[in-house]
Image (cartoon, rainbow, N blue to C red):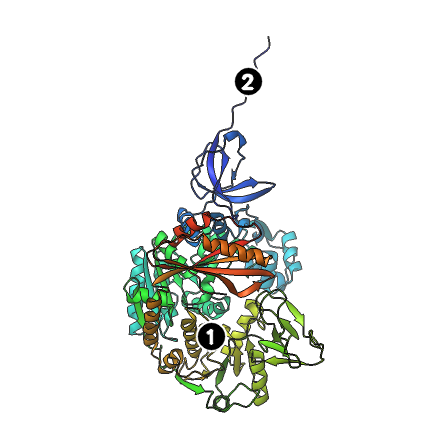
Amino acid sequence: MNQPLLKAPARQMQRAGVLLPLPLSGSYDYLIPGGICYPRGTIVTAPLGPNRYVGVIWGEPDGAIPDTKLKEAVPLEPSPRLPTVLCDFIDWVARYTFTTPGTVLALALRSPQAFEPEMPRVGFVHSGVAPKKITPARQRVLNIARDGLARSIQNLAEEANASPAVVRGLIDAGALARTTLPEFSPFLQPDPDFSATILNLEQEAAARSLRGAVASEQFSALLLDGVTGSGKTETYFEAVAEAISRRKQILILLPEIALTVQFLDRFAERFGCRPAEWHSDLSQKERRRVYRAVMAAEVRVVVGARSALFLPFPNLGLIVVDEEHEQAFKQEDGAIYHARDMAVVRGRIESCPVVLTSATPSLETYVNASSGRYKWLKLPRRHGGASMPEVRLLDLRRVRVEPGTWLSQPLRDALAATLASGEQAMLFLNRRGYAPLTLCEACGHKMTCSQCSAWLVEHRYHHRLACHLCGSQTVIPVACPQCHTPHSLIACGPGVERVAEEFASAFPGARTSIASSDMLHGPAQTQAAIRAMAKHEVDVVIGTQIVAKGHHFPQLTLVGIVDGDLGGFDGDVRARERTFQLLHQVSGRAGRAEKPGLVLIQTRNPDDAVMKALASGDRDAFYEQERKLRERAGAPPFGRLAAIILSGTDGERVREAGRGLAKAAPLVRGVKVWGPTPAFYQTLRGRTRERLLVQAERHVDVQAYLRTWLSRVERPKSVKLTVDVDPMSFF
């Protein structure tokens, strides 16, 4: 008699919404095998089209598609997951910045390799067996191995000053036993009591408030506002120490990788080891190591660029935004966000304090502090015996400057005196290259980029003309490309290379260094240049804004600002503020130790409010003036801005799309729409660009307004639309 066939039991499946790190508007429904209801944040792999992606279970499914048509998403082992608060933060950032959630999620999944199975390493330990033959090299290896710690062949050889062949011989003899090691060495844990810092009265009062904020384990925003050289870093290190003692994780955001070299050294001096780093120059292997350690709460402190804000901290207890005024905290492409503002949001979601530090706070932060929204901690004087430098304005309308030169006689005299006394100087010009413009003296033709509406900048050291927008380069032609006159191209205006050339001609015996992103390629070269300056291996550094960022050079007593008027006031509401901040920060490099500092600013506008504020040292008077101007204009922080940028290869189609978009703008009280107008750089990387600007009163929900407006308009697929909420630049 035949037995009836038994039906195999159906696999239990759960349905869930999965968000993928792609520019998608929301999650897609997938089936999750196993019959387990996985929590929000669980990492899965999911198919989409022909590819498979690492994604995240995001929430409830929408149920619009029947189960039979759904694909499976498979949770990774051993069920790694993003913290729920990070998922909430990603949703918040997406809504606020008018960005798809998948695009923001991609920032939090920057190292998908971190979810792959660990690849254990092979190590060796002392087996207790004595080899028959012993040599001095073998004995050194065995002495090292007796501590019981497992090491690789290479590490044993290096520590014992022996060859790898010696180590392999001991393995063959049975004196070293094979064992397995984790894929990555563990991070050293910072010691909050390693080297306590002696603080002055103002620092101690501020540190007490910071420690209390950390101990409360609640959200608060604090501005640590101190003059340059006042010891802000040492002060907020006390908050870091408090968080470490409470076994919390700490995130310290820095605006530039170039800042890290001195910062990491100072951190190690205070806490006994370096923190973990997170920035774009990490190798994939190191990125994987840091990401995995952060997720497992094995890393206590992370120092990173703005993208570190999206790391999966499960136990975040403190966020510090150092030099919070810096424009480098604004991400200008992809998911467009300001890391300072989003740090405050993440602190609120995480219920942890956020410390903003600066000698020249952004006006937004200054207003928040002065209104009581942020707690305002002040360090009004420099640490130790240092005093603020004297600032003098050199009026170029009256001071003699030789034709074709850029350093006035008073500045040259000050440089000569500084060098004669064995001290260091800095010349600052925020313009890379040799000259900002190259033109033909025969026909007037200007050398411009073929892909952008920008002049080509001469870089004489590399014998190239370069576009600083798209990065394209070309050899300097022998003849004018328009009139074909040979040797007719001339350099107009100075860049740092040209200033360095003039300085070398005037002071041939001085040791100089040029500090700009063109000359220093990557963190290693930048850090080497900073160390050379700190060790007094360089007499004069000539640089762009890279030299303004928080560096401490004890022997630097003179700062010369070659062109104080270079900031420009081309309709940007923050132009004056940024010029003041940059020049104030550059000035703050002088006289940070016992020797007094002098700052000379060459300007043709000595009566301008920025110049007067720098000369008088009355920062707050300048801020109050700016505050009133912004309030009258309804500009941030007293109003809201959002930019819409349209771009495409067909210029007429882009302009037509801009006109259609402007006509469809809803008429709402408290909202003005300006444009469309050509962007400051009308052509960028071969694409025509048009801008519209939304100006709204503070109470207006700009995101809701944009959502309503843009949903009404269809635009050609060839025209790209980008929204920048709270724009920081207007190019």
Which circle, 1 or 2, is nearer the viewer? 1
Q: Residue at label 1? A: 568
Is residue 185 shown to the viewer in this render? no
Rendered position, 516 above or below 130: below
Q: Quadrant of residue 248?
A: bottom left
Q: Nearer the viewer, residue 347 or 475?
A: 475
Look at mark 2 in the image and give the residue it sits on. 6
Residue in view at x 53 percent, y 85 percent: 406
Most distant residue in the top direction:
1
Q: Residues within 10 Å of mark 2 (few under 14, many from 20)?
A: few
- The picture places residue 657, in percent across and down from the top left corner, at 52, 54
Query: Is disc 1 placed on a helix, strand or loop?
Result: loop
First along the sequence among labels 1 and 2: 2
Please count the marks in the image: 2
Count neighbours of disc 1 (C-alpha within 10 A) and say few if under 14, some if 14 to 19, many if 20 or more: few
Is residue 136 visible in the rendered image? The answer is: yes
Q: Position of residue 441 (x, y in %)?
A: 64, 81
Q: Amino acid at mark 2?
A: Leu
Where's residue 504, x and y in %?
A: 58, 86
Q: Is residue 397 left or right of residue 609?
A: right
Label 2: element kind: loop
Q: Quadrant of the N terminus?
A: top right
- Quarter of the image for residue 465 reads bottom right
Does residue 231 appear to the left or right of 656 in the view shown? left
Q: Amino acid at mark 1?
A: Gly
Q: Percent x, y for residue 507? A: 56, 89
- The answer for how far apart the CA atoms under marks 1 and 2 are is 82 Å
Residue at the image point whose x is 46% and y is 61% from the top: 675
Of the pair 657 and 284, the residue shown nearer to us: 657
- Quick check: 15 above or below 221? above
Label of residue 669 in the image: none
For image coordinates 43% across by 49% down, the residue present is 707
